[in-house]
Every structure is written in C-alpha cells, then in structure tokens.
Image (cartoon, coloured by chain):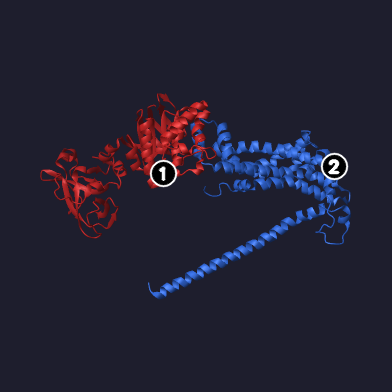
Chain colours: A red, B blue
Amino acid sequence: MAQVHLRKVVKEYEGGVQAVKGIDLDIADHEFVVLVGPSGCGKSTTLRMIAGLEEISGGEIDIGGTVVNDVPPRDRDIAMVFQNYALYPHMTVYDNMAFGLTLRKFDKGEIKRRVENAAKILDIGMLLDRKPKALSGGQRQRVAMGRAIVRDPKVFLFDEPLSNLDAKLRVQMRTEIKKVHQTVRTTTVYVTHDQVEAMTLADRVVVMNHGKIEQVGPPQELYHHPRTRFVAGFIGSPSMNFIPARLEEAGSGLVVRMTDRAVLPVPAARASRYAAHVGRDLLFGIRPEHLTEPHPNEHRPNIAHFEAAPEVVEPMGMETLLHFWVEGHEICARFDPAVEVAPGKLAAMAVDMDQMHLIDPKTDLVL
Amino acid sequence: MSASTASTIASYTGKKLGSLRSERRWALWTAYASLIVATIIFLAPPFYMLVTSLKSSAEISNLSGNPWIVRAPTLENYMELIANPLFRGFFFNSVIITLCVVAISMVISVLAAFSLARMKFWGSQALATGVFLTYLVPDTLLFIPLYQIVGGLGLLNSIWGLILIYPTLTVPFCTWIMIGYFASIPKELDEAALIDGAGWMQMLTKIFIPVALPGIIAATIFAFTVSWAAFVYPTAFVTTPEHMPLTIGVVSQLIRGDTFAWGQIMAGALMAALPPVVVYAFLMDYYIAGLTAGATKG
C-alpha cells in the first residue's frame, strides 16, 4: 500500500502538443481515486505515466515515497487492469494470474496460494484451467483483476476496465470492483469517462479537462458544489441545465430573470454571496432533478413555479424526462412517472432554488 | 395497407428471392468450373511425372500408345535413385541447407520483426519498408555480385556458401510477414507483460512467439520452400556434384549430354517435391492464418 503524489506532471508529445499540463494530485494510502473526463482530457495519459508506460515530460511522480520518473514499470510495484483485459491468450487463467509472480521468482506454493486466494475473492475458482477465449467478457475482466490482486502491489491502476462490457454487466462489475477494493484496500487509481462509474466507485473524483484538473473532491461535493461550469455540466446525468439569465434586485431580495415570464427569486441565504454580481449577465444552472412537477403540500421554502410546454417527453420507467426550450436553450426536467404530461401541452413546474447555481460566463467559475 | 399493395410486395419479394437463388447457383457453377480447370492445369504435370516415373526406360521410349497410361508399372527408377549415393548426397545437402537456412532466417526475422513492430524507435518505419524493398530485388540480379562475395570468402562449391546466401532471399519476406503479425497483437499485451515484470526478451519468448505461432509457421514454410526449391544460386555457386542440392543435382547428373534419364528425372523430381508437400499438408491452416493475419479486425 502506498501514497501517490503527482507534482507539476506534464506530458508533451512531439510537435509541442501537451496532453497533461502540469497537474498536482495527492492520493492517500488505501484511497480509491477516479480520474474522469471527456476523451482527450489527459486522464489515461496520466494513468499511463503513473504506470510507467508513458515517459514524463516534466514534474515528478512519487509512489510510496520513491520518485519513479525513471523507474521502469516492472519496478514500480503497480498492477494495471486494461480496457481490453490484455489477457495472454495462450495461457490458462491460472497461468495468466501466476505470470507476474513466476517472473518474480516466487516459489510455486506461494503462487498457488495467492492465485487461489484471488480466485476466491473474484469467484473464478472454477475457471482456472480455461483459456481466455472460453470466457465471457465479465469473466475475462475478473481474471484481469485477479492478475492484479495476486501481485499484492502498492497501487492498482484501472484504465476504463468496464468500457467493453454491456450495460448490465458494467453495473455488476462496478459493484464487484468496489467490493474487491473494500476487501484488499489497495490504493487505487481508476480512469473512466463515465461519470456514473466515477460517482459510485470513488472516495474522491478528479475531474479533468484539456489536460488540467478542474476539481478534486468526494462525489457528493462535486455534485453539490461544482467549482466550474465544466464540472457542473459533466457530473450528473442528465447534465445540468444552463440558461442565460440576469441577476437583478427585486424589493429586498434578488431574482434571476431568464425571460419576462421566467423570473425566479434567489434564496435569501445566497443574497450576500451574489451581491457583487447584481446587474450582470450570468448563467443560471439547475439540475433536471431539481426541476420537477410541483408537489401539493410542498413545505420547503424557495420553491419557484413556472409553466412550460415540453417538446419531447421521454418516459424512462422510474422517471419521465421533459425537454423544452427557454431562450433557445434546451432544458431538461425530471418528473415523477405518475404525472401525466404530453408534448406541446403546458405543464406546471417547480424549481428548487436552494439547488441553483450561478456561473460567471467570462471565467466559467461557479459563483 | 390495401390488398393490392400487399400482393405487389409479396410478388416483388418472391421475384427477388428467386433471382438471388439463381445468382448464387450460377456463381457456384462458375466457381466449380474454374476450380476444375485450375486443378487440371496444376495437377497434370505432376501426374505426368508420376506416370513417367513408374515406366521402364523401354516403355518411355516406345512412342506408340497413350503416354498418360502406364502399361507395366515399375519402381525401378525409384530403387535405382535411392541406391545411388550421389542422389542420397543431393537429398542430404538439401536437408542440411534447408534446416540451417530456416533456423537462421527465423531467428533473424523474428528478432527483426519484433523490434521493428513493437519497439518504436527512430527510423523503425523506414527500416521496415527498407526490409521489404530488398525482397523486391530479383535473385537473378544479385547472383553476380554475390558470386564475388561468396568467392572472396572461399565458399564456392560448398553448401555453407548457399547457407550464407539463401537468407538474403528468405529474411526480408519472413520479416515482413512477422512485422504484420506482431503489429496485429494488441499493444496492451506487451504493456501488461512489462507491468508483470517481463523484459523485452521474456516478452518475446513467453508472450509474442506463442501468440504469433501461426505467423511464425507461415514464415517458416516460406523459408523452407524458398531454400528447398532454390535453383539460380546453387547453379551459379556449386559445380561439384557432392555439394549440389536436389534441385540442380537431379538435372545436372541425370542428363548426360543428350541422354535424358526421364524415368529417374521424374522420380527424382517427385521425391524432391515430397517434403514441401508434406509440410504444406500438415501446416496449411496455420499458413493461411499467418498470411491473412491483421487483414480484418479481430
């Protein structure tokens, strides 16, 4: 087990293209950290630099108190699980899992003990004599994890391990990975582009964009208190709605005015926070789950109401998504499936203003 | 949907299905006809060789009757050849040359292909192309300068001269086949091996060679065929019968002046063709898999 520290880590390719632009990150012992972001944000490159599969152009990577910039992958005491499993096709499951230990000259008894222990954790004991081609996708991914577990490394690295699995299996394997981490407690760095995976697995999520870290924090913190527009939009599914709005004074309080018909009161508790921005054109951000049908007997304060005619209604079973347009921007609301709504017909909506966000469009920072 | 529309669709579909079936039948007939013609063209010479090899010299020189039929089959041509120490020497030379050339070619081309395909270094792409370009130079163009080199090394009239020279024919193509095969193996496999603790040599021997076995077999068959069947180089570099391989030995020793020992020539040629046929028959599936590797997304 070990801590991992990244200090001003840069990856620059030939031609001066920077994939990673000087990131700092401290990962604690036993921690499960997920790097998440869109394609090309530098998350996989960062992971591969930690693994030693990519050279570092600048900065320092420290694993377990040792700077590993020039240490080859085999001497970093890390184990990695790849998106396409990367199992050795000519070896049995047992040999795949034992390969790393054999190369490290472990004695046969110890290898057997470790492989059987990992197989027990992952419930693949009956597959040990099979070749990878005789396994399903989920089983292959389990074997790949087993290959990592037997090594008992300082750090586990996962590079989008669930991307090749179907939706149902992905959910199942997600739980499996979490269970394994709770059992072995090895420091883990996990890369995914799927924010649901990030939210469900991570102790802390690292949101990356354009080679930089946008925000680091526990999933709930990122969800409730995003620091930038990118994080606000990236975390949460469906993603947060953004509507251009003007912050205005109204009586003793503040309001956000999107159109003349949609003027929403800002909760009094936020007044001092936003006071300096009165009169400015900002972005009003609200998540679909905070834009719902009105509840009779609603006792929460700061619920604003308005009406809109949805253009598209998507019944999802556990919820119904309504899509409508405000000032040329598509807005998504999340309704209870029991509420009857139809495209083109006005529907009453409730906005939980306690969950609103205001974003400065010039800096993209959440105010 | 109206009744008329429904019937139109039904008749249209029926017509299409019928035409598809007849198109397929026509394609099959054409394929069979072409294959039968090709088979006859390719099998007629060896069949004629077999027939001739089973005839006595008297029967061969008798021009009456159908030359494709053996009237009094005999193995005397084969027995005489096998009993002939010179012929056994040709065979032995061919075996030694081929085994050495295959071994040398495979060691060089597997190592070269692995480094060119997987160890990205400056100029690796240009080198890979260069390796293939050398294959395009015909051996008829090379044998004059190579004669100088082999002569300079004192290896004329020696099987070791041929063992030294044949890899110039086999290594480029074998390397090219292996580059394609190694390149088609996902890069995560060597990354996983690196993380597991393998060095480059362990990665090659424990991961790449077993995974790329079909490609290696394809390259081995190619090297085997080229060195077993080489004709130009041994004709140029070997003139003493005891150092000749089968290809030129059969021709040079069984034709004396204007006397052709046709029965023995045919028997010798058939026996010479036997090893490649056996190798192909057993390894054909691997050979095809090796040549087509990487052609489609796995």
Decide if residue A261 is on the left or right side of residue A196: left
Q: Nearer the viewer, residue A318 or A291?
A: A318
Q: Is residue B57 left or right of residue A150?
A: right
Q: Residue furthest left?
A: A251
Residue beneath the point at 32% across and 39% down: A199
Name the residue type under label 1. Ser
Q: Are marks 2 and 1 in contact (CB under 8 Å)?
A: no
Q: Chain of mark 2?
A: B
Residue nearest the viewer, comparing A342 with A258: A342
Q: CA separation, marks 2 and 1?
A: 68 Å
Q: Position of residue B219 (x, y in %)?
A: 64, 43
Residue at the extreme bottom: B4
- Element type at marker 2? loop
Q: Quadrant of residue A178?
A: top left
Quarter of image, res B171: top right
- The quadrant of the image that shows the N terminus of chain B is bottom left
Residue B115 image point, x, y percent: 58, 36
- In the image, which is nearer the foreground, mark 2 or mark 1? 2
Amino acid type indicated by mark 2 = Asn
Residue wearing tag 2: B84
**In front: A342, or A336?**
A336
Task: Name the chain under label 1.
Answer: A
**Residue B145 visible in the shown view:** yes
The mark total stands at 2
SS at badge 1? loop
Residue at the location (85% across, 45% down)? B80
- Residue furthest to the front in view is A126
Specify few, some or many for label 1: CA neighbours under 10 Å numbering under 14, 14-19, or 20 or more.
Answer: some
Task: Report which residue position mark 1 lands on.
Answer: A163
Q: Residue at x 26, y 55 (%)?
A: A324
Look at 68% across and 37% down and name the residue there.
B103
- Residue B137 visible to an observer of this rendering: no
